[in-house]
Image: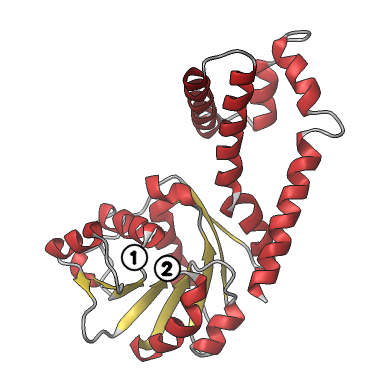
Amino acid sequence: MAGLHDFTDTLVLVGAGKMGGAMLDGWLALGLDPAKVAILEPTPSPEIMASQARGVRINPPAIDASIVVIAIKPQEAATVVPGLKPLLGAGALVVSIMAGKTLGFLQSALSSDIAIVRAMPNTPAAIGRGITVAVANPKVTPEQRALADRLLAAVGAVEWVEDEALLDAVTAVSGSGPAYVFLLAESLARAGAAAGLPVELAARLARATVSGSGELLHRSALDAATLRANVTSPGGTTAAALGVLMAADGLDPLLAKAVAAATLRSKELAG
C-alpha cells in the first residue's frame, strides 16, 4: 500500500467519530504529516484530543483546505455541509463517507464545480480490514481519484464503480453486511446451546468459528464455494447441515430478501 509521506496539502476531516477516527489512525500510520491534518468535531473523543499532541489541529479558527473528508452522520448533513463551502480552495477535493447522501445532494450543498467522491466504507475499517466502494463526479481528475483511493485505502480495500445507483446495493451487501455476520455468530451460538452445549461455550465456539473462517477466507486464494466444499464430506455431518441451509427455502433466498430490503431502505433514505 502506498504511503502518505509525500502528501503536502491540507486535509480537513469533518467529523471524527468511529469511522472518521479510524481513517485518521490509518492516515497517520501511513506516514501522513499530522501538521497537515485539521479536524472539525464539536465533541472530540479523548483519543482524538490525544492526536493534538502529535500536531493535528482540532477545530482551528481558519483553514484553506485542499481536501475535505466528510465523516459526519447523515442527519447532520443539511446543517453542516453547506457551511463547508468557505473552506474549499480552488481545485479542492471533497470525499464523503456519509451514508445515503448522494453526489447530487453534495453538489447542491457545495457547488456543481467541486470535485466530489462519494464512498461507502464498512465497520471493519476500525481494524484496517474494511472495504470501501467509491464513485466520483465528472469534476474529479485522475490525480484526485488516485489521491482519494490512497486515503480510503488506509482502512482497507477500495473498489470503484461508475454508476452511483449501485451504492444502494453496496450499502446492503458490504455496508450492512457485518451485522449479518455478527447475527450468524449469535444464531450459531443459540443453536449450539439448543443442542446441549453450555451457553458460554457455545458462544466461544461460534465466535472463534466465524472469525477464524473469515480470516481463512481472507487469506486463501480459493473462493468461498471451494472452501465450503473442502469442509464437506459426502454423507457427513456438514453435508447434513448444508442440506438444510442450501435448500430451496434456505439461506440464499433469505439473504436475497434481506439485501433487497436493505437496498430499498437505502434508496428511501437517499430520497
Work out whether residue 138 can be spotted: no
Q: Which residue is mark 2?
A: 71
- Which of the 4 quarters of the picture holds residue 59? bottom left
Q: Is residue 21 left or right of residue 72?
A: left
Residue 216 in the image, given as x and y percentages of width and height: 52, 27
Looking at numbered disc 1 in the image, what kind of residue is underneath it? Ala
Q: Is residue 31 left or right of residue 102?
A: left
Q: Residue at image x 51%, y 74%?
A: 75
* Circles 1 and 2: CB atoms closer than 8 Å: yes
Nearer to us in this view, 254 or 130: 254
Where's residue 264, x and y in %?
A: 73, 62
Query: Quick one: 45 or 169, which is closer to the camera?
Result: 45
Secondary structure of the residue carrying tag 2 is loop
User: Does the rendering let one see residue 131?
Assistant: yes
**In whole angstroms, how far apart are the C-alphas of marks 1 and 2?**
7 Å
For the C terminus, the image quarter is bottom right
Q: Horizontal and vertical percent for residue 208?
A: 48, 24
Q: Residue at x 57, y 74 (%)?
A: 101
- Relative horizontal placement of residue 96, taking residue 234 as reference (left or right): left
User: Quarter of the image holding residue 36?
Assistant: bottom left
Give the colour scheme of this rendering. secondary structure
Looking at the image, residue 177 lies above or below residue 250: below
- Which residue does the image show at 28% across and 67% down from the upper left? 7
Q: Residues within 10 Å of mark 2 (few under 14, many from 20)?
A: many
Q: Residue furthest left?
A: 53
User: Element at badge 1?
Assistant: loop
Residue 203 picture location, percent across and down: 50, 25
Q: Label 1, on which residue?
A: 16
Q: Could you tell me which residue is drawn at 37 percent across and 70 percent down?
A: 15
Q: Which comes sooner in the sequence, label 1 or label 2?
A: 1
